[in-house]
Amino acid sequence: MTQPPAPEAREPSSPAWELLLPASSAPARARGRALQSALREAVRSGRLASGTRLPSSRDLARDLGVSRGLVTEAYEQLTAEGYLRAGRGAGTWVGEAARAAAPGASDLAPRPSTGVRADFVAGTPDLSLFPRTAWSAAQRAVLAGLPHHTLGYPDPRGLPRLRTALAELLARRRGVVADPERIIVCSGVTQAVTLLGIVLRARGQHGIGVESPGSPQYEDLFATVGARAVRLPMDGEGLAMGPLRESGVRTAVTTPSHHFPSGIAYSARRRTQLLTWARRVGGLIVEDDYDGDFRYDRAPVGALQGLDPEHVAYTGSVSKSLAPGLRLGWLIVPDALTDDVVARKRYMDLGNPALDQAVLARFVERGDYDRQLRRCQRAYKERRDTLVAALREHLPGTEISGIAAGLHAIATLPDHCGPRQEFLDRCASAGVCVRTLDHYGGGGAGDRVSLVIGYAHLPPPRITEGVRLLAHAAVRARFP
């Protein structure tokens, strides 16, 4: 493989390396993510140009005053994402694919733009399953019968018709206590949590607990409202209660029906403990039910909110069931927060588009949404089974977890897969885009590599081919 030119590494005193310095002063638990984010942004912005050779992990760690392990992990992660390239004995440099990374692009799911043969990054459904015919029919029917006054500025909570339809749907499918007056239609879970963050910060809450491992977005999200994310560890049953109690936070964001990314469902005992904690401190549990409808071994676990709607705020969206581009979601809040959240929603955007809300309402009322969920359930279960079979065939000895529900799995590779960085380098070279559990704040089993493999958006043949490429990268990493 032809390697790009490797000019001398720039000195740490240059503007590009100065961009990394704030990461070294971040809190210890967030320092690794901060370094990765700063390095990624330096590449995106062009301050680290394509072909620029990076210092060795030892040299950069010394210059920034951080551990070498943090730098090594940052290099590995950005190599896997396609921002960096590495050659055996030739160092690390900014990759060619970085030219296509647009400044300001989302940091939640960056992907190489070219040469990708298998994209295993979790978080995206199969957009080809979007029910175009049924959705178009709903749009035509809504446009034909929508009263003129409905096209004015909507109620910031959302159209009453949609809130009523959602209340019935969520009560029936998820066991939610859903009063339409407490439902706020919003632009997905991110806006829902942002609204809560604004209200809670105004009430004096400076820190909000979030799961670790968990979604990497919360540090930036809560920073925008003047609060900070407090990472709290998980154990085998859910959010660990000891660290939660000791943290002093009064709000915790959770994924109890299907934890992201481990895939566990919180135990009944832990759910009870969480509610007891919330009642004792006068606190709030934010329940992100991001893929609660997709369970393959039995009926989905009911929502935590149904047990105590005055201490749990519930949020979800159609991003996994229909398409994230619709930007339609919902938030159900305790009575004590409803007025403040509605007021913030009013001044944030004056409400979601009325036409889109009316279409979704009709889609739910006529049973089209239930049919879509059944269609996705069948497709995603088939893909889950394909992934498990491919891992067992091509990477025997892999430990697979988190497969009872959701759209991704955890694959902890055998310990004979070679050095971690070498393996990730081989994956990137083979066109396999994948993330390790470390990206979300979790570790693997000792020195073993744990991958978070998203499969819902890939057809079964692509899943099998991707796993075969993973296995080939593992063998080559062991025997280069």
Image (cartoon, grey):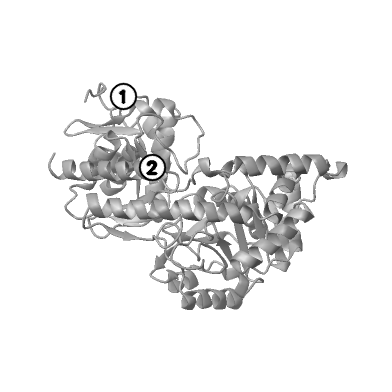
| In the depicted structure, whether residue 226 falls above or below residue 77 | below
Depth order, front residue of 22/268? 268
Residue at disc 2, secondary structure: helix
Residue at image location 80% in from the left, 51% down from the top: 155
Q: Position of residue 447 (x, y in %)?
A: 22, 55
Asked if one can make out residue 80 in the rendered structure from this viewpoint, the answer is yes
Q: Quadrant of residue 74?
A: top left
Q: Quadrant of the N terminus?
A: top left
Asked whether residue 340 is in view, the answer is no
Return the residue nearer the eye: 88 or 111: 111
Give the distance between the C-alpha atoms of the residues marked 2 and 1, in whole angstroms. Answer: 18 Å
Horizontal arrangement in the rendering, residue 124 relative to residue 224 (left or right): left
Label 1 residue SS: loop
User: In the image, what residue occupies the spot 59% across and 54% down?
Assistant: 371
The local crowd at label 2, few if under 14, some if 14 to 19, many if 20 or more residues have their Cα within 10 Å, is: many
- Return the residue found at the far left: 479
Q: Residues within 10 Å of mark 1 (few under 14, many from 20)?
A: some
Q: Find residue 190 and report its horizontal and vertical position in percent.
A: 58, 50
Which quadrant, please, contains the C terminus?
top left
Amino acid type at circle 1 is Gly
Q: Is residue 313 above or below residue 388?
A: below
Apparent side of residue 169 relative to residue 128 in the rendered image (left or right): right
Q: Give the label on residue 36, or none.
A: 2
x and y, in percent, of residue 111 in the image = 41, 37
Mark 2 vs mark 1: which is more N-terminal? 2
Mark 2 near mark 1, Cβ–Cβ under 8 Å? no
Can you identify the residue that label 1 sits on? Answer: 51
Q: Nearer the viewer, residue 284 or 181?
A: 181
Residue at point 70%, 53% (across, down): 185
